[in-house]
Image (cartoon, grey):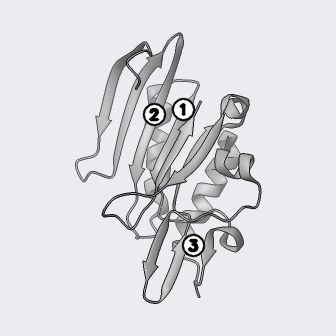
């Protein structure tokens, strides 16, 4: 957080395996849950179900989920040079939870059908958009920009959001 932003952290939950870090915090007058996660390439729907149970137990009305989902939302937009859809079962579960919880992908909302990838492999060339933010739909008007930027010594790009 910028030093000019007033915030308070009430609690944090860290997965022993390093798969997620969850903060219960307030920024100004708004209390919400911030989730940073990394799901391995295991096609495990229960991972996402568990994340949402933890979020519900915290009890905040608002939350933001970000980082490495290791699955795409829309194979036609988010894959380049793939033969098969990865993590099919986890993808179905995440999309269902997004719909139930009214979560949106601000990158897709702001950039329409623009193809931009956050992961790449060079031989053979494959790319996918595996890293993104999920926000409540009512938060989209407060979202000014979502961009990807190159990273250093990683096959994933950095995703930046400005609210």
Q: Residue 88 got which mark? A: 3
Residue 41, x across and y down, in percent:
41, 70
Please report the residue visible at 30 percent of the width from the left and 63 percent of the height from the top.
153
Res 7 quadrant in image: top left
The answer to which of marks 1 and 3 sits earlier in the sequence is 1
Q: Sequence order check: which comes first, mark 1 or mark 2?
A: 2
Residue ID at (42%, 63%): 156
Tell me: residue 112, above or below residue 54. Answer: below
Tag 1 and tag 2, C-beta contact below 8 Å? yes
- Element at label 3: helix
Camera-nearest residue between 56 and 114: 114
Name the residue at 55% across, 69% down.
Answer: 89
**Res. 136 in view:** yes
> Residue 63, which numbered label?
1
Q: Is 123 situated above or below 88?
A: below
Q: Could you tell me residue 4's position as x and y percent?
A: 43, 15
Along the line of sight, the residue nearer the viewer: 144 or 132: 144
The answer to whether residue 117 is above or below residue 94 is below
Q: Which residue is mark 2?
A: 34
**Is label 2 in a helix, a strand or a loop?**
strand
Q: Residues within 10 Å of mark 3 (few under 14, many from 20)?
A: some
Furthest residue toward right: 112
Disc 2 or 3, which lies upstream in sequence? 2
Label 1, label 2: how far apart the Cα atoms are: 6 Å
Marks 1/3: CA–CA distance? 25 Å
Number of the label disc, if any, that sits on residue 113:
none
Q: Indicate which label's residue lies in the foreground, 1 or 3.
A: 1
């Amino acid at each position: 957080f910028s030093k000019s932003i007033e915030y308070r952290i009430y609690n944090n939950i860290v997965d022993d395996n390093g798969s997620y870090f969850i903060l219960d915090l307030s920024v100004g007058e708004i209390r919400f849950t911030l989730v940073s996660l990394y799901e391995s390439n295991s096609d495990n729907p229960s991972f996402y179900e568990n994340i949402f149970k933890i979020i519900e137990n915290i009890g905040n009305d608002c939350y933001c989920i970000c980082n490495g989902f290791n699955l795409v939302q829309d194979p036609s937009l988010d894959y380049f040079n793939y033969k098969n859809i990865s993590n099919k079962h986890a993808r179905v579960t995440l999309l269902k939870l997004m719909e139930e919880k009214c979560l949106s992908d601000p990158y897709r909302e702001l950039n329409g059908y623009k193809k931009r990838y956050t992961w790449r492999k060079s031989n053979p060339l494959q790319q996918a958009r595996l890293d993104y933010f999920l926000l409540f739909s009512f938060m989209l008007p407060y979202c000014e920009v979502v961009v990807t930027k190159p990273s250093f010594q990683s096959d994933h790009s950095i995703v930046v959001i400005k609210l």
